Amino acid sequence: MRVGGLLDPCNTEFSHEMTVQRIYESPRVTKPYTGEQWHAIEKLGHQVDADLRSGDVRLTMGGEPTFVSLDDHDGAEWTTAALGPVKRQRAVELLGRLRQRFAPGGLLHFGQGKWYPGEPLPRWAFGCHWRKDGVPIWEDASLIAAVLWTEKEGGLYLGRLAVRPDRRGRGLARRLMAAAEAEARRRRLPRVHLSTRLVLLDNRQLFAACGYREIELRCHDGYTAPTSVVMEKQL
Protein backbone atom coordinates (compact mmCIF):
# COMPACT_ATOMS: atom_id res chain seq x y z
CA MET A 1 0.00 0.00 0.00
CA ARG A 2 1.25 3.44 -0.88
CA VAL A 3 0.03 6.67 0.75
CA GLY A 4 0.68 10.02 -0.86
CA GLY A 5 -0.38 13.61 -0.34
CA LEU A 6 0.62 17.09 0.67
CA LEU A 7 1.00 18.78 4.09
CA ASP A 8 0.87 22.49 4.66
CA PRO A 9 3.13 24.02 7.34
CA CYS A 10 1.47 23.96 10.79
CA ASN A 11 1.43 27.24 12.61
CA THR A 12 -0.56 28.39 15.67
CA GLU A 13 -0.30 31.78 17.26
CA PHE A 14 -1.06 32.36 20.94
CA SER A 15 -1.65 35.70 22.58
CA HIS A 16 -2.43 36.83 26.13
CA GLU A 17 -3.37 40.22 27.42
CA MET A 18 -4.15 41.36 30.96
CA THR A 19 -5.13 44.79 32.18
CA VAL A 20 -5.17 45.93 35.80
CA GLN A 21 -7.26 48.99 36.49
CA ARG A 22 -8.05 50.66 39.79
CA ILE A 23 -11.82 50.81 40.12
CA TYR A 24 -11.99 53.34 42.91
CA GLU A 25 -9.52 55.10 45.13
CA SER A 26 -10.59 56.84 48.30
CA PRO A 27 -9.13 60.30 48.74
CA ARG A 28 -6.13 60.22 51.03
CA VAL A 29 -5.40 62.82 53.63
CA THR A 30 -2.12 64.46 52.66
CA LYS A 31 -2.47 67.66 54.65
CA PRO A 32 -3.87 68.49 58.12
CA TYR A 33 -7.60 69.13 58.27
CA THR A 34 -8.67 72.72 58.32
CA GLY A 35 -10.68 74.00 61.26
CA GLU A 36 -13.88 73.97 59.18
CA GLN A 37 -13.27 70.39 58.01
CA TRP A 38 -12.64 69.10 61.51
CA HIS A 39 -15.72 70.91 62.81
CA ALA A 40 -17.83 69.23 60.10
CA ILE A 41 -16.43 65.80 60.97
CA GLU A 42 -17.10 66.29 64.67
CA LYS A 43 -20.62 67.54 63.97
CA LEU A 44 -21.33 64.47 61.86
CA GLY A 45 -20.03 62.19 64.63
CA HIS A 46 -22.40 63.75 67.17
CA GLN A 47 -25.26 63.34 64.71
CA VAL A 48 -24.45 59.65 64.25
CA ASP A 49 -24.34 59.17 68.04
CA ALA A 50 -27.73 60.86 68.37
CA ASP A 51 -29.24 58.64 65.67
CA LEU A 52 -27.88 55.51 67.36
CA ARG A 53 -29.27 56.56 70.75
CA SER A 54 -32.69 57.34 69.29
CA GLY A 55 -32.81 53.89 67.72
CA ASP A 56 -31.57 52.18 70.90
CA VAL A 57 -28.57 50.82 69.01
CA ARG A 58 -25.82 49.76 71.41
CA LEU A 59 -22.27 49.29 70.25
CA THR A 60 -19.54 47.38 72.00
CA MET A 61 -15.89 47.01 71.16
CA GLY A 62 -13.91 43.92 72.05
CA GLY A 63 -10.26 43.13 72.20
CA GLU A 64 -7.78 40.48 73.21
CA PRO A 65 -5.62 41.74 76.06
CA THR A 66 -2.45 39.71 76.42
CA PHE A 67 -1.31 38.66 79.87
CA VAL A 68 2.23 37.39 80.42
CA SER A 69 4.14 36.28 83.48
CA LEU A 70 6.37 38.73 85.31
CA ASP A 71 8.78 35.90 86.13
CA ASP A 72 9.49 34.57 82.62
CA HIS A 73 7.84 36.84 80.07
CA ASP A 74 10.28 35.78 77.32
CA GLY A 75 9.64 32.05 77.80
CA ALA A 76 8.11 29.96 75.02
CA GLU A 77 4.78 29.53 76.84
CA TRP A 78 4.34 33.33 76.92
CA THR A 79 5.43 33.98 73.35
CA THR A 80 4.73 31.08 70.98
CA ALA A 81 3.82 27.82 72.76
CA ALA A 82 0.22 26.90 73.54
CA LEU A 83 1.05 25.66 77.05
CA GLY A 84 3.98 25.43 79.40
CA PRO A 85 4.99 24.70 82.98
CA VAL A 86 2.86 27.39 84.66
CA LYS A 87 0.74 29.05 81.97
CA ARG A 88 -2.48 27.18 82.77
CA GLN A 89 -1.98 27.60 86.51
CA ARG A 90 -1.52 31.36 86.16
CA ALA A 91 -4.57 31.58 83.90
CA VAL A 92 -6.79 29.74 86.40
CA GLU A 93 -5.57 31.97 89.23
CA LEU A 94 -6.28 35.10 87.19
CA LEU A 95 -9.72 33.86 86.20
CA GLY A 96 -10.58 33.17 89.84
CA ARG A 97 -9.52 36.68 90.87
CA LEU A 98 -11.54 38.24 88.05
CA ARG A 99 -14.58 36.19 89.09
CA GLN A 100 -14.23 37.29 92.70
CA ARG A 101 -13.90 40.92 91.65
CA PHE A 102 -16.51 41.23 88.90
CA ALA A 103 -18.82 38.20 89.06
CA PRO A 104 -19.30 36.60 92.49
CA GLY A 105 -21.52 33.57 91.94
CA GLY A 106 -20.53 33.37 88.29
CA LEU A 107 -20.01 30.11 86.44
CA LEU A 108 -16.46 29.20 85.42
CA HIS A 109 -16.19 27.31 82.14
CA PHE A 110 -13.08 25.50 80.91
CA GLY A 111 -13.53 24.60 77.27
CA GLN A 112 -11.96 24.41 73.84
CA GLY A 113 -10.60 27.57 72.30
CA LYS A 114 -8.93 28.36 69.01
CA TRP A 115 -7.25 25.64 67.02
CA TYR A 116 -4.45 27.08 64.94
CA PRO A 117 -3.22 25.33 61.76
CA GLY A 118 -0.26 23.07 62.36
CA GLU A 119 -0.93 22.59 66.08
CA PRO A 120 -1.96 19.08 67.22
CA LEU A 121 -4.41 20.36 69.84
CA PRO A 122 -6.68 23.36 70.28
CA ARG A 123 -5.95 26.05 72.84
CA TRP A 124 -7.87 26.30 76.09
CA ALA A 125 -10.66 28.84 76.49
CA PHE A 126 -11.48 29.86 80.07
CA GLY A 127 -14.66 31.82 80.63
CA CYS A 128 -16.73 33.30 83.42
CA HIS A 129 -20.47 33.75 82.97
CA TRP A 130 -22.82 35.64 85.27
CA ARG A 131 -26.22 37.29 85.42
CA LYS A 132 -26.58 41.05 85.08
CA ASP A 133 -29.06 41.17 87.98
CA GLY A 134 -26.48 39.70 90.35
CA VAL A 135 -28.33 36.45 91.03
CA PRO A 136 -25.65 33.74 91.44
CA ILE A 137 -25.74 30.87 88.97
CA TRP A 138 -23.01 28.76 90.62
CA GLU A 139 -22.73 28.57 94.38
CA ASP A 140 -21.59 25.05 95.30
CA ALA A 141 -17.80 25.07 94.95
CA SER A 142 -17.67 21.44 96.13
CA LEU A 143 -18.86 20.30 92.69
CA ILE A 144 -15.48 19.57 91.18
CA ALA A 145 -16.09 16.95 88.48
CA ALA A 146 -18.70 16.04 85.88
CA VAL A 147 -19.52 13.48 83.22
CA LEU A 148 -22.05 13.96 80.44
CA TRP A 149 -23.69 11.07 78.61
CA THR A 150 -26.41 10.35 76.09
CA GLU A 151 -27.81 7.30 74.31
CA LYS A 152 -26.15 7.01 70.92
CA GLU A 153 -25.34 4.28 68.41
CA GLY A 154 -26.77 1.50 70.52
CA GLY A 155 -24.99 2.41 73.73
CA LEU A 156 -24.29 5.10 76.29
CA TYR A 157 -21.98 7.70 74.77
CA LEU A 158 -19.73 9.73 77.08
CA GLY A 159 -19.55 13.17 75.55
CA ARG A 160 -17.56 14.88 78.28
CA LEU A 161 -15.52 13.87 81.31
CA ALA A 162 -13.90 16.63 83.37
CA VAL A 163 -12.24 16.98 86.75
CA ARG A 164 -11.12 20.27 88.20
CA PRO A 165 -7.33 20.56 87.77
CA ASP A 166 -6.55 20.87 91.47
CA ARG A 167 -8.57 17.71 92.28
CA ARG A 168 -7.09 15.34 89.72
CA GLY A 169 -5.18 12.20 90.63
CA ARG A 170 -7.65 11.20 93.34
CA GLY A 171 -9.70 8.61 91.44
CA LEU A 172 -12.61 10.92 90.66
CA ALA A 173 -12.54 10.18 86.92
CA ARG A 174 -12.75 6.42 87.58
CA ARG A 175 -15.71 6.96 89.88
CA LEU A 176 -17.49 8.97 87.21
CA MET A 177 -16.79 6.26 84.62
CA ALA A 178 -18.22 3.66 86.99
CA ALA A 179 -21.33 5.79 87.49
CA ALA A 180 -21.81 6.03 83.72
CA GLU A 181 -21.47 2.26 83.36
CA ALA A 182 -24.01 1.74 86.14
CA GLU A 183 -26.41 4.03 84.29
CA ALA A 184 -25.90 2.07 81.07
CA ARG A 185 -26.72 -1.16 82.87
CA ARG A 186 -29.82 0.42 84.40
CA ARG A 187 -30.96 1.32 80.88
CA ARG A 188 -30.03 -2.19 79.71
CA LEU A 189 -27.59 -0.87 77.14
CA PRO A 190 -24.90 -3.31 75.95
CA ARG A 191 -21.95 -0.92 75.86
CA VAL A 192 -20.42 2.41 76.84
CA HIS A 193 -18.37 4.25 74.21
CA LEU A 194 -16.50 7.51 73.82
CA SER A 195 -14.06 9.37 71.59
CA THR A 196 -10.77 10.97 72.56
CA ARG A 197 -7.91 12.59 70.68
CA LEU A 198 -4.97 10.41 69.72
CA VAL A 199 -2.45 12.76 71.29
CA LEU A 200 -4.14 12.65 74.71
CA LEU A 201 -2.17 9.64 75.89
CA ASP A 202 -3.10 10.08 79.55
CA ASN A 203 -6.80 9.92 78.68
CA ARG A 204 -6.33 6.84 76.52
CA GLN A 205 -4.39 5.11 79.29
CA LEU A 206 -7.08 5.97 81.84
CA PHE A 207 -9.86 4.58 79.65
CA ALA A 208 -7.84 1.46 78.87
CA ALA A 209 -7.28 0.90 82.59
CA CYS A 210 -11.05 1.10 83.06
CA GLY A 211 -11.57 -1.70 80.53
CA TYR A 212 -12.11 0.26 77.31
CA ARG A 213 -10.56 -0.87 74.03
CA GLU A 214 -9.82 1.14 70.91
CA ILE A 215 -12.03 0.12 68.00
CA GLU A 216 -11.87 2.85 65.34
CA LEU A 217 -9.76 5.79 64.20
CA ARG A 218 -11.44 8.94 62.93
CA CYS A 219 -10.45 12.26 61.34
CA HIS A 220 -11.66 15.71 62.31
CA ASP A 221 -12.84 18.03 59.55
CA GLY A 222 -9.95 19.41 57.54
CA TYR A 223 -7.53 16.59 58.40
CA THR A 224 -6.49 13.65 56.26
CA ALA A 225 -4.74 11.63 58.97
CA PRO A 226 -6.59 10.20 62.01
CA THR A 227 -6.89 12.61 64.93
CA SER A 228 -9.19 10.74 67.34
CA VAL A 229 -9.94 7.21 68.44
CA VAL A 230 -13.25 5.58 69.43
CA MET A 231 -13.12 3.40 72.54
CA GLU A 232 -15.79 1.13 73.98
CA LYS A 233 -16.50 -1.22 76.85
CA GLN A 234 -18.93 -4.07 76.48
CA LEU A 235 -21.11 -4.56 79.57
Image (cartoon, grey):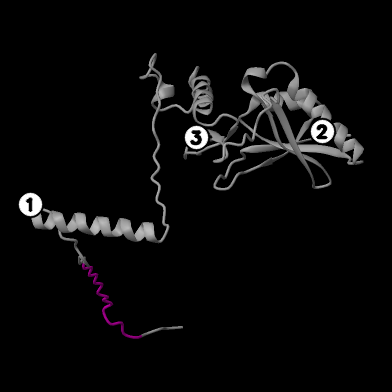
Q: Which of pointers 2 and 1 indicates the residue nearer the eye?
A: 1
* Above or below for 130 versus 48: above
Q: Which mark is residue 180?
A: 2
For mark 1, what is the residue?
Answer: 31
Q: Which of pointers 3 and 2 indicates the residue nearer the eye?
A: 2
Q: Looking at the picture, which amino acid does disc 2 mark?
A: Ala
Residue 134 location (% of width, % of height): 57, 36
Q: Which of pointers 1 and 3 indicates the residue nearer the eye?
A: 1
Residue 8 location (% of width, % of height): 28, 82
* Above or below for 149 versus 177: below
Q: Secondary structure at mark 2?
A: helix
Distance in Å between CA atoms under marks 1 and 3? 47 Å
Q: Secondary structure at mark 3?
A: loop
Residue 28 shows in the view = no
Q: N-terminal of the two: label 3 or label 2?
A: 3
In the rendered structure, which segment of residues is drawn in magenta? 5-19
Q: N-terminal of the two: label 2 or label 1?
A: 1
The answer to whether the residues at label 2 and label 1 have Cβ atoms under 8 Å apart is no
Residue 96 location (% of width, % of height): 54, 24
